[in-house]
Amino acid sequence: MATFFEGESHTFSEYLLVPGYSSSENIPANVSLKTPLCRFKKGEQPRITLNIPMVSSIMQSVSGERMGVALATEGGMSFIYGSQTPESEAAMVKWVKDYKAGVVESDSTLTPDMTMEQVMDLKERTGHSTMPVTDDGTPHGKLLGIVTSRDYRPSRDDHQAKVATFMTPREELVTGTKETTLKVANDIIWDNKLNALPIVDENDHLVGIVFRKDYDSHKSNPDELLDANKRYMVGAGINTRDYAKRVPLLLEAGADALCIDSSEGFSEWQKLTIDWIRENYGHDVIVGAGNVVDAEGFRYLADCGADFVKVGIGGGSICITRETKGIGRGQATALIDVCRARDEYYKETGVYVPVCSDGGIVYDYHMTLALAMGADFMMLGRYFARFDESPTNRVNVNGQYMKEYWGEGSARARNWQRYDLGGAAKLSFEEGVDSYVPYAGSLKDGVGMTIYKIKSTMCNCGANSIHELQQKARLTLVSSTSIVEGGAHDVVLKDHNQSVSYH
Ligand SMILES: NC(=O)C1=CN([C@@H]2O[C@H](COP(=O)(O)OP(=O)(O)OC[C@H]3O[C@@H](n4cnc5c(N)ncnc54)[C@H](O)[C@@H]3O)[C@@H](O)[C@H]2O)C=CC1
Ligand SMILES: O=c1[nH]c(=O)c2[nH+]cn([C@@H]3O[C@H](COP(=O)(O)O)[C@@H](O)[C@H]3O)c2[nH]1
Ligand SMILES: [K+]
């Protein structure tokens, strides 16, 4: 006879927090969101502590190198996607590790023979108006000039005009060199009343650009997640097939943590992968595993030596795994079950194995719920895909800005092919969709607002740390009618957009 789990499985929206007593000490400024990334023994410190409980999904449409830098700047960690060759994944990791805070690689680069129309298209897609011009149109080509929105007037000028005719040419540009420190770059920017300073190497090839506004923000990033050498920390996704080739390249590139990326992690493949890493690198390398949705799955991976365990099958916004394969479990129930198992494991063995809640976060308060239910941190796909720093295009759909977002199990992501289920590739079925998500501006602003909301709710629960929240939180299931009661109801909204809330 099969096993039947007691009760239904629930999701975040079916729960609410019941506030607890808060003292005058419970104010957002006093709340710390520091949280362990990897396993540690009782009385010891984890090797990596995140400053905010957020990591970005191991997905092509979420975690590229710019996401890596932007999220580490705010105190979280990106896991660079593994659905690419080991070489290109390692190059992205290296890019983050080599990143000199303040020097940005151009994502909007022109050639001299492009037209004004193409310039406007590119600006629409990336949202960036400072565009260097290089000989080959790459961000590290020979610098020939720069175009900003002050160089052309779309209402008056010929849209077919070539960039060469309206750019500010190289000889009129003020530039810095690789040796220019950020502080000196900032002085040059101020002395010359510039908005941006291109940095070039000894052959006059573009290295990157220092922006006036970035220097100011760099000074105010108290939560930056840095390694011992003051470089940004970054993670990387791996799979259970090509680890003997991929892992060495990622570690050489400087990856701070690895994570096995799979829809279903209660399997021998994960054990074999972790065993290989331990045999070749001992316990120095941090490797997370998953995904699981119950206590047994957690215990298996904890015993395999996983440094953290990821929870969630089928709850992601682009996921259709439950529909195609019929596997999964409500995210809240899965998380609660696994966190209980983690606490028992800690009591029994004295080893704490952090739990990551992966997928299904829609509203900011879902994050507070996930933490209250026991998650040490959350992995988010849709949430981060909406920001400037995700690797996808920004597009205008019916007058609204959107960013593209597609699942790793979608045909689009699988194009690069790592699927070998023992059959031909054409036998595979899709487990994810290709979609749009509403564009939400810069990661810094979005994450800042989310963090503030989490801290405020924690204060309502009388908690100034995640650990305290997990001890003190009081949660209640809600009926479907009380969910209706919780929204605006029985009033006529003046502004229709109010009902479409994404936070
Ligand atoms: N969290 C979720 O609910 C879901 C996530 N995804 C995402 O889609 C991507 C792909 O996930 P999966 O299809 O689960 O990838 P996967 O690589 O874990 O598994 C694919 C298939 O390959 C088999 N396999 C694994 N290692 C093997 C080996 N060494 N030799 C032979 N066969 C092996 C597995 O048994 C499985 O049938 C991931 O990025 C994952 O995160 C996809 C569906 C659901
Ligand atoms: O069923 C699936 N098919 C897919 O194609 C797919 N791609 C990603 N994922 C998982 O979804 C998580 C992101 O979820 P959110 O967008 O809700 O944050 C991610 O972190 C993954 O766990 C997938 N699940
Ligand atoms: K889903």
Image (cartoon, rainbow, N blue to C red):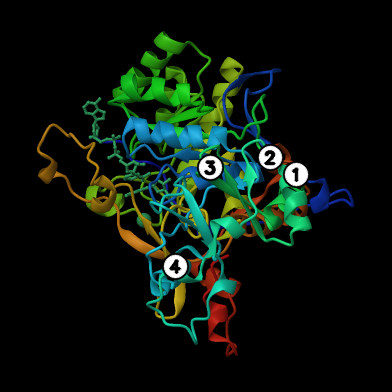
For the residues bearing labels 2 and 1, Cβ distance under 8 angstroms: yes
Alpha carbon of mark 3 to alpha carbon of mark 1: how far?
A: 26 Å
Which element is circle 1 on?
Answer: helix
For the residues bearing labels 3 and 1, Cβ distance under 8 angstroms: no
The amino acid type found where label 3 is placed reads: Gly
Mark with earlier residue (3, 1): 3
Residue at 25%, 42% in the rendered image: 416
- Residue, disc 1: 184
The amino acid type found where label 2 is placed reads: Thr
Tell me, yes or no, if residue 260 can be seen here. Answer: no
As rendered, which of 430 and 397 lies closer to the eye? 397
Residue at 38%, 47% in the rendered image: 60
Alpha carbon of mark 4 to alpha carbon of mark 3: how far?
A: 32 Å
Residue at 54%, 27% in the rendered image: 256
Label number found at residue 180: 2
Alpha carbon of mark 3 to alpha carbon of mark 2: how far?
A: 24 Å
Q: Which mark is nearer the camera, 3 or 1?
A: 1
- Image side of residue 467 versus residue 303, left or right: right
- Residue, disc 3: 68
- Residue, disc 4: 163
Q: Residues within 10 Å of mark 2 (few under 14, many from 20)?
A: some
The amino acid type found where label 1 is placed reads: Val
Mark with earlier residue (4, 3): 3
Percent from the top left, x then y, of residue 37? 58, 31
Alpha carbon of mark 2 to alpha carbon of mark 4: how far?
A: 28 Å
Whether disc 1's CB lies below 8 Å from ligand 2 is answered: no
Percent from the top left, x then y, of residue 97? 55, 32
Q: Residues within 10 Å of mark 4 (few under 14, many from 20)?
A: many
- Image side of residue 37 versus residue 23, left or right: left
Q: Which mark is nearer the camera, 4 or 3?
A: 4
As rendered, which of 415 and 452 lies closer to the eye? 415
